[in-house]
Image: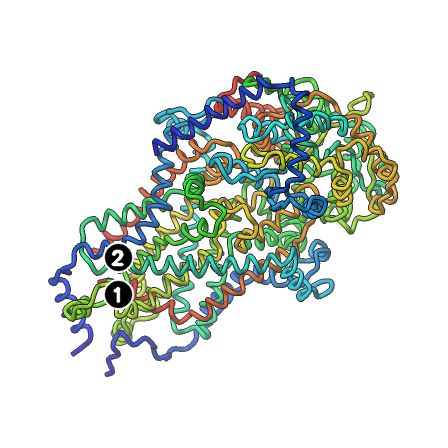
Amino acid sequence: MKRRITRSVAATIAVLVGLGLAACSGTGTSGSGDTGSQAVDAALKKGGEITFWSWSPSAKTQVAAFEKAYPKVKVDFVNSGGANDSNIKLQNALSAGKGAPDVVQMEYQSVPQFVLAGGLLDLTKYGFGDLKHLYTASSWANISQNGIWGLPQDTGPMALFYNKATFDKFGLQVPKTWDEYIDAARKLHAADPSYYITNDPGTDGGLGSAMLWQAGSKPFQSKGDTVTVNLQDEGAQRYATSWGTLVSEGLLDNIGGWSDQWFANLANGKIATLPAGAWMPGVLESGAAAGSGNWRVAPMPTYGDGPAATAENGGSTEAVTKQSKNPALAAGFLKWLNSSDESVGIFVKSGGFPSTTATLQSSEFLNDKPAYFGGQEINKVLLQAAKSVLPGWQYLPWQPYANSVYGDALGPVYASHGDLSKGLAAWQSANVTYGKQQGFTVKQ
Amino acid sequence: MSSIALRADTRERTATRRPRRRWTGLWFLVPFLAVFVVTILAPVVYAVGLSLFRNRLVGGDSFVGFDNYIQAFSDPKFLEGLLRVCVFLFIQVPIMLVLALIAALAIDSRRLAGAAFYRVAVFVPYAVPGVVAVLMWSFLYSDRYGLAGNLNDFLGFDFLKPFTTEWILPSIGNIVTWEFVGYNMLIFYAALRTVPEELYEAAAIDGAGPLRVVWSIKLPALRGAIVIATIFSIIGSFQLFNEPNILAGSAPGVITTYFTPNMYAYNLSFVGQQANYAATLAIIMGVVTAVIAYIVQARGARQEVR
Amino acid sequence: MMRTPSSVRPRPNRQRRSVILTVVMVVFVIYSLLPLAWLVVSSTKTQKSLLSSFGLAFSGPFAFFDNVQQTLTHDNGIFLQWFGNTLVYVVVGAGGATLLAALGGYGLAKFSFPGKRIVFAVILGAIAIPGTALAVPTFLMFSQLGLTNTMWAVIIPSLVSPFGLYLIWVYASEAVPTELLEAARMDGAGEIRTFFTISLRLLAPGVATVGLFAIVATWNNYFLPLIMLSNPDLYPLTIGLQLWNSQGAGIGAQPIFNLVITGALLTILPILLAFLLMQRYWQSGLSAGSVKQ
């Protein structure tokens, strides 16, 4: 047992040293970048075998197409079941020192944590920096802090999805500002208490973070080992006042997202709007099929008369793990997966929202008139959303944990129709305590 | 002669005769012990070791002695969870065991037509995997599209609200009872079947009524089984995890990540990267559980002697 | 007056039926079977009508056979793979657990050696510790041994059944007379041979009982396999169903609740069958085990 502890201490030291070296070798890699992308191409030609963990519905089709294009490469695809399960399994494999796949799907918000743990490979040396121009600024920013940790797969700029049938039924106008949104919420719920403007039980940390982001808040800043957590800045207060009204007046349905009650209420219109990421159309089409034709998309409401502003909610990347025995080949697969036209095309067809600017701006994409949305050209709205994502956002180095305890802090506040800002303060305090326990220097 | 006399004779003889093989017995135990040591004992020892260290995201491993334990005893989340499982235990276990007892007595009473059918039907829930059990009860509890909702509509007011803070613990208790009442019933029923026929006949001769028979014959025969069932139920209650964990999705905001100590340890370990603290909590829970189980066993044995 | 020896079980049914008891037991049965009624009814519904109809009433097209066919063929028939895996885990795991418990309990019962009480106290103490915190150390250990993500990672931990050990201990003390063993020893038979040829036969009801409980436990095993396995081809049914369940959540979701429900029903059926077939073993096994000396 003593041996085991010493081994893990040694491993940690090795990791920290490795991180330090990687930081030192940093950005001056344009020369090695050329050799890097050649190494990738060579590996693809040579062939080999790699393991790929993903939970995307389109992953299997993409893998099949890849193997057809590169017959010498065998990809062992594993359905990892979802972000949470995948994180747990990946973390276990990293602790054990083996068992991690070559390429792994990961939500943007989890990237800082796994970078810190030294589990991911910096892809700068394979010339991935040259691919920056292919992607939207906000999606690239998610994977490019102090290195290149993957390639964006999808992106989730938020927009307001609303049920036109419900709006028409109750004589509501599409809200342009949050004040108008609150008025609509009151009117709707007063007219029929089984209808709600939207659902939010106060347990989705990803949604909460995105809403803070959209309000202009920058609650999480991290630089090395120093982290600042401030859930009371100007943007946060704006959000707390506005959304807090919905909470305290009981205007939010307490159903959790992705439960069958949720799907049922989306289909029958009792949930009238969804502020959600651009991947929501796929979810609506497959889970709430009975609501087809009723839903539309509009830009997110603004705070007052400001310009259009939105945030990213969700979205993931693929990354190469340090445990990979064939990193060049893994990098090659990753490159094909998220930048080749064929692969991105499969992804979009399965309902994903792409992060490649070419796809986003293609006329085929923009002219799409899905029947579910009554023929509205939704991608035009969503492209605008992608362009108005507020810059400068950072996730905590322990974001998955922070999101898991978000419900502990805010759930009770929502359930008792209490003060949202108190709930945020509780979340802040939980994060500060955790950060200090984990050895960070935490400022508030 | 009577079989009872014959048995007493045999017992006497075996008591005085000491089995001669001393260490062979240990060899029979070795396969079990080998796997036990590897799969349970070693991880426990490792966990004890873990609880004396702290591994930070920044800074790695360091020896902290009993700091984790001190932190645990003043951690409101842990104490809240501990109190909750204690309350759960003191209410759910007796209810479940009493129900199991009633069912066992009823089935054993010979005054029930089709006893075999009841035996199987009551036992069936035990065969259902926990995940599936919670899935089924989630439906029944749902006040939107489930049975609870229908009942509320029928009655005209919100009578059943299983997913509120006040009712969530009884709701979970109900699921656990449903899952295990049949299992405990069978343990009791089997113990009842060992009662010698002579005792019933003697009671009949004395003119004892059915309730008297239960009190003087059946319940004493059940004592050992009740003790065992209680101990394992206590262990199960303290380790409550599966049901609240799966139900958390249907009851957002009501079931926290530290609802029970076991859930707290799980989330600390797998989401919070704090395996050391999780190990500490587990060790503390293990000690508490073992102490209470020992007390129950000692009291049960004492009553037996009496 | 006829004295029936205590070894003869059947009791003459002389008394009249009690209405109260029947009522009580009917309530019990409704309580026990109601949730399962929901499962059966739901397995006949399509995904769409699941969300839009009352749970206990049949509704929409009768899709039971459709659902079963879909469940068995979805994703290249991985359900059957999971079913096969579970069979392996149960046969080897539960079988092994029963054997180890039988050997161990027999040893504790029929032989005298120092440290018996301590051994049992240690075993009971160790299972008092919640398994969730032991999962990570077990995972790390198995990883060092190269066993993670293999069938052994599921089978080996399921070989330990402390309750089974205790049960056989108590049962063997009663059901295997020491004279028989002494006689065999005097005939020159080795202990192992004696165990397998003589004692095991006497222990049969108890062993069958332990076996049945072990079957249920390994069939429904969930937590440790979840940690140990990352390859869905090795999943047992419980984890496979949860994988399908979680596919209904998250971004890019494609809910297949109807398959989850049908799959759950199919998962329960084999256990019920094993159950019914082994009914007669239970009561005699457990009953003799509870007899006090």
**In which quadrant is the C terminus of chain A drawn?**
top right
Residue situated in front as seen by the camera: C195 or B14: C195
* Res B266 label: none
**Image mark 1: chain:** C
The quadrant in which residue B304 appears is bottom left
Residue that mark 1 sits on: C195
In-front residue for pair A47/A292? A47
What is the CA distance from the residue labelled 1 to the residue labelled 2? 10 Å
Using the image as rendered, state which of residue B132 and residue A190 is in the foreground: B132
Which element is circle 1 on?
A: helix
Give x and y (percent) for residue A263.
71, 47
| Residue at the farthest left position | B16
For the question of whether residue B212 can be seen, the reply is no
Give me the chain letter of mark 2: B
**Relative height, residue C184 to residue A134 (above, below):** below
* Amino acid at the residue labelled 1: Phe
Do the residues under discs 1 and 2 have CB atoms within 8 angstroms? Answer: yes
Instruction: Please give the residue where the numbered disc 2 appears in the rendered image.
Output: B28
Q: Position of residue B173 (x, y in %)?
A: 49, 49
Residue A368 visible (yes or no):
yes
Under circle 2, the secondary element is helix
Label 1 crowd bin: few (<14), some (14–19), many (20+), radius 10 Å:
many
